[in-house]
Amino acid sequence: MKKINDNIINIGVADFKTDLFEGQYRIPNGICYNSYLVLDDYVTVFDTVDKKFTTEWMETLEKSLNGRQPDYLVLQHMEPDHAGSISGFLTKYPNVQIVANTKSFALIARFNKNLPEFNKKVVADGETLCTGTHTFKFIFAPMVHWPEVMVSYEIYSKTLFSADAFGTFGVCEDNEKITPANWADEACRYYIGIVGKYGSQVQTLIKKLAPLEIDTICSLHGPHLSGDLSGYIELYDSWSSNRAEKEGVVIAYASAYGNTETAVEMLAENLSANGCGDVKVFDLARCDMSKAIAEAFRYPNVVLASITYNSGIFPVMTEFINGLTERNFQNKTVGIIENGSWGPIAGKVMTSMLERCKNITYAQNKVTVNSAVDDTAVTAISALADELCG
Ligand code: FEO
């Protein structure tokens, strides 16, 4: 339980049990499923939590209610990490009114097959709900990250309940220490992994929110954000518009016997010596793939380095490139390092996989390693570094 202000309390839960969020993202520092209680003449709850935590959440809710009863349960997003405890909530509070849009009500029925009848309040985009001092304006945000998503702006406290937007992995114990700089890495991994395909829809939401005066952002994951929010919003704007956030090069590689790795290490040394900004190197067989994919979206230059394998490329490089293309990778300069002992075609395969990506410029200095790095490869690596830093 964490107070946002005198009337708004985060009654969400911290999940340290799940190994892979959504079945695929590593969460070594856990994840929060936030839920908010807004105390007023009428009592409102924003979203539930994953069903693994229904009991814990309901206990916190009851304690925070201090003898009162909830009047409204607002459902902003129907993904089970937030909507998994609707049934438990309605069992205890059958008279509550569920506030959601038409698409959410359709999904409630699909996820909860035997739910008894309950009170519904269907809201439209832009509709408001007054609970006394507080007035909530519901703003539809389709595909940020499911079609039914809406966010809610509370006019009196200038609080944005932002659903998945501005969410992050990790459990934060000390909200006061959050800054855009220490929030960005995991928030970007979360954003690119989960919402990244829908950048244009996030841009639409950012434009809808622009006229609002926002003091606090209460996401469904991670810490609430307050103070000067411009840094967080600028990061979201750059990620969702495929604009490079910072200078530098991401090198993602797949190496079987260390020779491609040697070429990558040489390139990284050259880039660093040239003062080319950050140089981020990912061994795709061993790194957190979601981290490598997210970082590739943050920088203007990405180098793909792979051996030729089974007349194609190494499987982890296929996974990496697919992770880029399914999230609309674009606006990049891409360098290629290929390795092969009798028929090096990795470069051709990697390039063809990026064919549908918009605005990709290939570095002219492609590096071909024939089994192991030789003088020709050293010269090509140096030329690639010079070109990327030019
Ligand atoms: Fe955190 Fe899209 O659910």
Image (tube, helix red, strand yellow):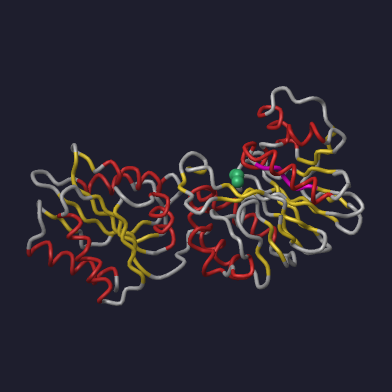
Q: Quadrant of residue 3?
A: bottom right
Report x, y in % for residue 208: 69, 58
Percent from the top left, x then y, of residue 89?
76, 36
Up/down of 49 relative to 331, above or below: above
Q: Main secondary structure of the magenta part?
A: loop
Residue 35, position in %: x, y?
71, 49
The residue shown at (22%, 40%) is 312
**In this picture, residue 315 sits left or right of residue 308:** right
> Does 69 appear in magenta?
no
Residue drawn where x is 21% and y is 63% of the image? 265
Determine the residue positioned at 12% across, 65% down.
378
Q: Tell me the quarter of the image containing the C terminus.
A: bottom left
In screen coordinates, is 111 left or right of 190? right
Q: Residue at x 48, y 59 (%)?
A: 242
Q: Is residue 341 left or right of residue 117?
A: left
Q: Which residues are magenta?
A: 45-49
Check the image and report above or below for 320 versus 267. Answer: above
Q: Quadrant of the N terminus?
A: bottom right
**Ligand 1 shown in quarter:** top right
Q: Quadrant of residue 162?
A: bottom right
Q: Is residue 23 left or right of 367 when viewed as pictured?
A: right
Front-lying residue, 1 or 339: 1
Where residue 275 sits: x, y (%)?
Answer: 30, 77
